């Protein structure tokens, strides 16, 4: 019995996707729900699983093909005819096609092993001196580029800066990190402090969490924070929903899960939809100062940076402290400079007296 393999349903905002390298070849046995091929959309990479156990007998769409929801991409032979099914000829690569990169083997988590290597991030091609080489951008990279350019054309972006003394947070982490990990099974990082501090500051300045929709201002009762995660394939921003209700352990666990699933191409469209505010941490790459770009339709984004020991004045004395620059980019059409600056000042004050940030909600 022949069963068609179809592209899964996509969201309203995603019309099509591009097929990545096939994980299975014609003539190979497949198990039910085993991933046959990955589909790269504008927002996320989705897996197309086998609808049944059997043999892959036909591939109708090659790597690089652009396909829509419900489109047939392959055929599975099941039952007694599966073993005897003759492999169909594999379609040729579309011209001009991007060079095929070898799949990268991702180290599996202890409790689960992937059935096949995950799609590799596009490696930089080796280009001989005196030559050039042109390769197409991935859909994710193209979409990120499109959104960033659109943000600069549609919003009146302005960035305000401040700096925070991270010594109180560092001391609190050192004091409680071992107990925290034993109790909750997750490490106590910096992000839970910043998420909870941002939520507290937005309670004072809710305009930071608002958005423009045409001639209306949309006020949000929940704070849904996008956590920017950079990958070679492109930036993804999964959403930490109702962040104002989450405990430090819930925040750290959710962010660790986002990072793991982003690495393994397991994020869903639902994970990336919505969001009322974003946080990006260029400090993990060594950035000392930057101006983040808005993630529309959000009206503000917070940039964290590298912690650097610097001389600062305290009570008339010069002391060395671990300092971090903060940057808040905001849409000046909606947010006045006073509110943006005061929000950042409030954030600084909360982070420099962080004891309340470790309390359970």
Image: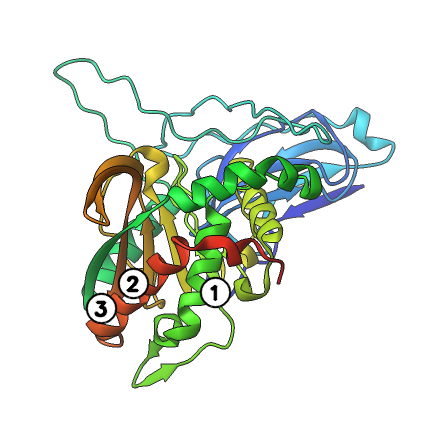
User: In the depicted view, which residue is nearer to us: 234 or 27?
Assistant: 234
* Residue marked by disc 1: 274
* Residue marked by disc 3: 154
Mark 3: give few (<14), some (14-19) or many (20+) Cα within 10 Å.
Answer: few
Label for residue 345?
Answer: 2
Is residue 234 visible to us here?
yes
Placement of 237 over or under 26, stated as above or below: below
User: In the depicted view, which residue is nearer to us: 327 or 173?
Assistant: 173
Placement of 249 over or under 108, stated as above or below: below
What is the spatial separation of the Cα atoms under label 2 and label 1, in whole angstroms? 27 Å
What is the spatial separation of the Cα atoms under label 3 and label 1, in whole angstroms? 18 Å
> Residue at horizontal 70%, vertical 27%?
110
List x then y, in percent, for residue 337. 20, 71
Please identify the residue farthest to the bottom as the structure is shown: 215
Q: Which-is-in-front pick, marks 3 and 2?
A: 2
Find out whether the residues at labels 2 and 1 contact each other: C-beta distance under 8 Å: no
Find out whether the residues at labels 3 and 2 contact each other: C-beta distance under 8 Å: no
For mark 2, give the secondary structure: helix
What is the spatial separation of the Cα atoms under label 3 and label 2, in whole angstroms? 27 Å
Is residue 16 visible to us here?
no
Instruction: Name the quarter where the N terminus is drawn.
Output: top right
Q: Is residue 160 left or right of residue 219?
A: left
């Amino acid at each position: 019995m022949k069963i068609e393999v179809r592209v899964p349903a996509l969201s309203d905002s995603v019309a099509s996707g591009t097929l990545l390298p096939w994980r299975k070849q014609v003539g190979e046995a497949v198990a039910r729900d085993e991933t046959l091929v990955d589909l790269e959309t504008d927002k996320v990479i989705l897996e197309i699983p086998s609808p049944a156990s059997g043999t892959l007998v036909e591939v109708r769409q090659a790597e690089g093909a652009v396909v829509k929801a419900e489109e047939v991409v392959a055929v599975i032979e099941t039952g007694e005819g599966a073993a005897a099914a003759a492999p169909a000829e594999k379609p040729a690569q579309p011209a001009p096609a991007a060079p095929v990169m070898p799949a990268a083997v991702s180290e599996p988590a202890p409790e689960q092993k992937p059935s096949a290597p995950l799609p590799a991030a596009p490696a930089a091609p080796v280009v001989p001196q005196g030559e050039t080489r042109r390769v197409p951008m991935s859909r994710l990279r193209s979409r990120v580029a499109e959104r960033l350019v659109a943000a600069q054309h549609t919003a009146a972006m302005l960035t305000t800066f401040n700096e925070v003394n991270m010594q109180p947070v560092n001391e609190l982490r050192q004091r409680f990190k071992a107990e925290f990990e034993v109790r909750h099974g997750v490490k106590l990082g910096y992000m839970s402090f910043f998420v909870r501090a941002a939520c507290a500051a937005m309670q004072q300045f809710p305009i930071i969490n608002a958005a423009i929709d045409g001639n209306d201002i949309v006020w949000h009762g929940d704070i849904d924070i996008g956590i920017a995660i950079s990958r070679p394939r492109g930036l993804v921003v999964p959403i930490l929903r109702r962040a104002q209700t989450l405990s430090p352990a819930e925040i750290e666990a959710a962010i660790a899960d986002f990072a793991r699933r982003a690495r393994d191409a397991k994020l869903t469209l639902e994970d990336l939809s919505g969001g009322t505010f974003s946080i990006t941490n260029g400090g993990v790459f060594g950035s000392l100062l930057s101006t983040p770009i808005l993630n529309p339709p959000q009206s503000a984004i917070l940039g964290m940076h590298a912690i650097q020991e610097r001389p600062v004045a305290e009570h008339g004395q010069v002391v060395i402290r671990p300092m971090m620059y903060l940057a808040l980019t905001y849409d000046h059409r909606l947010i006045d400079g006073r509110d943006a600056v005061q929000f950042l000042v409030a954030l600084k004050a909360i982070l420099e007296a962080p004891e309340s940030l470790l309390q359970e909600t």
